[in-house]
Every structure is written in C-alpha cells, then in structure tokens.
Amino acid sequence: MDHRRRRKAWDRGFSIKALATYEPRIKNKRLVHILNFDIMGNVGFGKEFNSLATGIEHPAIKGVHDHMAILGTLGHIPWLLNLASRIPGAASGYSSFFQWCGDEMERKQKDWDMDKSPQDIVSWLLKAYVEKDISAAPTEAALHEDSRVVIVAGSETTATTLASALYYLAKNPAILSKLQRHLDEVMPGRSNDWSYEKVKSVTYLDDIIQETLRLRPAVMTGGYRVTPAEGIQVDEVYIPGDVNVFVPVQLIQTDERYYTDAKQFVPERWNEKREMCTEGAPFFPFVLGPYSCPGKNLAMMSLRISLSTLAQLFHIRFGPGENGQAFENETWDTFTTTLASLQIQFQPRSNED
C-alpha cells in the first residue's frame, strides 16, 4: 500500500509531459558514467554538474560505486548492513555519498519555486512533499533517500547499459554499419537533421538496446522480495516464510529454453528473426508489475539519444590493445552492475561513410 501511494509522485516526474521538458537537456549532453551523471543532475535536480565540460569525474560518481559495492555484498544479509551503518568508520564508503545527496536536496528545497511547474524529478517529489500529497515522502529522511534513488537508479543503470551497448557495437562492426544505414536513411543530414521523433522511428536502434538489456541487464540479480508468512511453493521446492528471495534476471534472459543462441548478441531476434524467441520469452530488465521501474521511458530516451548520436557521427571501435575480454568477464553484480574498464575509440565518419 505504501509503495502504491509513493509511486504516484515518482510517476509524475517521469510522465510524458515531464519527459518533454527533459529531452532537449539530454540531447546537449554527450563518456558514459560522466554523461549519465550530468544528465541526471540536470533532469533530476535541475542543476549542471559540468563533469563533461571539465573532464573531471565528480566525487559523487565514486560515492555511487562505493555505495553499490557495499550494498552488493551486505545486501544479502540485511541485519549486517544495518549493523555496519552503526559501526564508526564502517560506512565511510557511502556516508560521503549520502551527505552529498542530502546537501543537494537541501539546496533544492531552498531554491525551488513552488509556484512554478516542476521542471525536474526532484521538484515533482518536493511538490508532493510540500503539498502533503498522499504520494509524498513521509519524512525529511525519506525525502533524502529519494534523492539517492534519483542518482543511483537514474544515472548508474543507464550508464552501464550505454557502456554495454557500445561494447557490442565495437565487437560487431556489421551491426554498427547496419544501424548507421538506418539512421542515415531518416536523417541524411546527420547532426543537422537530427530529431528525437526521427530517432524513435528507427526500430533497429531499439532492437540493439533491447538485446543489450537482455544480455546485460543493469540490475543482473533483480530486486529482493520476502516470502509470505505461510511460505510459498515453487514447483517442487517449498520456501519458508519471511525469507528473502530474488529472480536472477540475467540468467533467465539468457536461458536457451527461451532464446535461440541465447548468449549471442543478435538484435534481429526482436523483429526480423522473431523465431529466435519463444512465445512469451521472459524479458524484464525494468522489472514487471507494480514494482516496475518508473524511469523506464527516461532511460530509453537517454539511450536512444546517446547511441543514435554516437553511431551516426563516429565509427566505434576497440581502442589499441583492447579486445573487450575484461569487460565481458570481469563484471561484478553489486545490486547494480559494476563494469570493468573498456577502451573505446571514436573515429569521425566522413561524408562518404
């Protein structure tokens, strides 16, 4: 019940009306974690973090990674996570990130003009809080928690998906060339002819994003749920009550029972070669039902804008000495996904390309 009430405030911040105000600000941003952190600073908090302009990684980005590393390890044992937060120094990996998010929320509260229509996600959450809407955060502490969710869910997950998509494009030059042909057909003037409506018409771009999310969902394990007090029967297995369980998203989405060549990157399986997916093949990178990600449309917008721009303007290749093996094999499941480094080379396309 609490989730359903709170969800309404978040949904307003990701509505079609709200997304229309975010799109031009996303288009003006172009480096993966830094890019998406800057985007979420703008559409999340209405503030320019300027990480791309300076080329310097904002300390909060490291704070996100430290927080996720701790959460990924201790999240399996909730009581230990609570205990660690009360041990002096044990929470230093994420306390600075918490403090930064709290400071940003307090700044926003001071600067926000409640008489104006909200132009960013946090303003929609503040509007609900100030108006004591049923969907509002119940306390100041809960409002600060929301600010952390905006950064982690809004920038970290999209950044890892963008990095993975660039990896697959660099690894599969024929797929990149095919995408470039589709983009050039609807936007022959390239950047001079670019519009989001035209980008949305390129279904092959969505196929690439979908296939990336199938193979490497940003949240690989999926969110935890608690079994009911009476327990639950799953096929031949009985799980007692009050036990944390989860559904491993990546394992299910790469199961050969549902997808032909399930471990291979084949964007065509979503349209041209639908026979490569069984009827009702499981696909839930944004989760399903009442707990589905409210930021799905914003994430898709950000990915479409970033990938279409990069693919149309550049040849995307592995950098010198890079083969992508570390990126493929050294990924960590830390609730969100922690990726190994990946060196990508962007070479400008000529008019003849």
Image (spheres, rainbow, N blue to C red):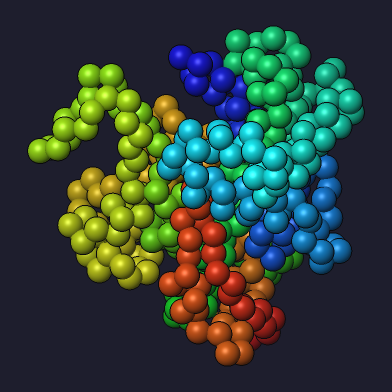
Residue found 42% across the figure and 27% down from its top: 290
Against 351, is 89 above or below? above
Is 281 left, or right, of 106 in this rendering? left
Left or right relative to 31: residue 201: left
Tell me which corner region of the image, top left, top right, bottom left or bottom right, holds residue 342.
bottom right
Q: Which residue is drawn at 64% across and 15% down?
A: 138
Which residue is at the front of the view, 259 or 75? 75
Judged left or right of residue 338, residue 59 is right
Q: Visible in this render: residue 105?
A: yes
Query: How far from the left and from the top, in percent, is residue 195?
Result: 66, 55
Query: Is 108 located above or below residue 268 in the figure?
Result: above
Percent coordinates x, y for residue 238 in the rendering: 16, 33
x, y (%) of residue 313? 66, 73
Image quadrant where residue 114 sits: top right
Q: Is residue 317 above or below residue 45?
A: below
- The residue drawn where x is 22% and y is 65% is 260
Task: Work out which quarter of the rendered image holds the C terminus and state it.
Answer: bottom right
Q: Which of 270 and 228 is in front in this view?
A: 228
